[in-house]
């Protein structure tokens, strides 16, 4: 990421609405913190037709839908985008199943088997990122890598902590 302080098409802060998500287990909190750090560290994030960034993103829930509350650098609200999680449910279930297989394989499988499972996991993660990018199109401008990091955060919010 460019450390250009005048670059406006970026996130400078990501927070989670604790009322919506609550505190997780230490493992869950760790995964969420890593996902947020990675997202802030390197992202391209903007709003079509608006140049009010850099942005602060607060993620919450409204009626079981993801609420992306976007504010400007000073914290003034700019917009809220409500994202249905229904299209992601099956993908998240499959993703967590393959992650369980991956963690189990690490203990007993050959390197080739582990690599094959990991390739499947990465492929599913990429599919989730593409679905997210498609669902955000026209509301949020972001590149594929940023969509991938946002999908990582969504998975961290849904992960139950059994790995």
Image (cartoon, helix red, strand yellow):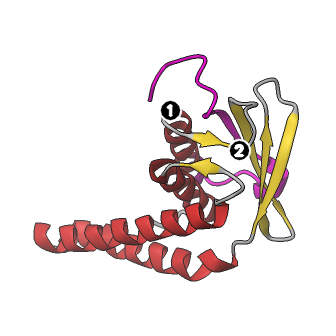
Q: Quadrant of the C terminus?
A: bottom left
Q: Is residue 132 left or right of residue 148?
A: right
Q: Earlier in the sequence, mark 1 or mark 2?
A: 1
| CB-based contact (under 8 Å), mark 1 and mark 2 | no
Q: Is residue 29 left or right of residue 16?
A: left
Of the numbered discs in the image, which one, if any, rests on residue 141? Answer: none
Q: Mark 2 falls on what kind of element?
A: loop
What percent of the width, then of the height, locates residue 135?
Answer: 64, 67
In the picture as drawn, the residue positioned furthest to the bottom comes out as 90
From this view, report whether residue 151 is shown above or below residue 6. Answer: below
The residue that disc 2 covers is 47
- Is residue 66 among what the camera can see? yes
What percent of the width, then of the height, locates residue 69?
Answer: 80, 47
Can you tell which of label 1 and label 2 is closer to the viewer? 2
Packing grade of label 2 (10 A; few <14, some 14-19, many >=20) is: many
Magenta range is 1-29
Q: Mark 1 falls on what kind of element?
A: helix
What percent of the width, then of the height, locates residue 56?
Answer: 73, 35
The residue that disc 1 covers is 41
What percent of the width, then of the height, locates residue 149?
Answer: 50, 50
Q: Tell me what residue is drawn at x 54 percent, y 41 percent.
A: 39
In the picture as drawn, the residue positioned furthest to the front comes out as 49
Q: Is residue 36 left or right of residue 104?
A: right
């Amino acid at each position: 990421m460019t450390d250009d302080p005048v670059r406006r098409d970026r996130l400078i802060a990501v927070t989670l609405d604790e009322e919506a998500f609550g505190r997780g287990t230490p493992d869950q909190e760790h995964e969420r913190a890593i996902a947020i750090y990675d997202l802030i560290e390197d992202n391209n994030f903007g709003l079509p037709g608006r140049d009010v960034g850099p942005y602060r993103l607060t993620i919450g829930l409204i009626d079981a839908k993801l609420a992306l509350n976007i504010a400007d650098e000073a914290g003034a609200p700019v917009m809220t985008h409500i994202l249905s999680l229904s299209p992601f449910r099956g993908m998240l279930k499959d993703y967590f199943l393959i992650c369980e297989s991956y963690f189990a394989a690490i203990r007993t499988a050959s390197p080739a088997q582990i690599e094959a499972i990991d390739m499947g996991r990465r492929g599913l993660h990429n599919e989730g990122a593409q679905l997210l990018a498609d669902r955000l199109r026209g509301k949020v401008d972001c590149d594929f890598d940023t969509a991938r990091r946002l999908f990582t955060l969504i998975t961290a919010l849904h992960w139950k902590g059994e790995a």
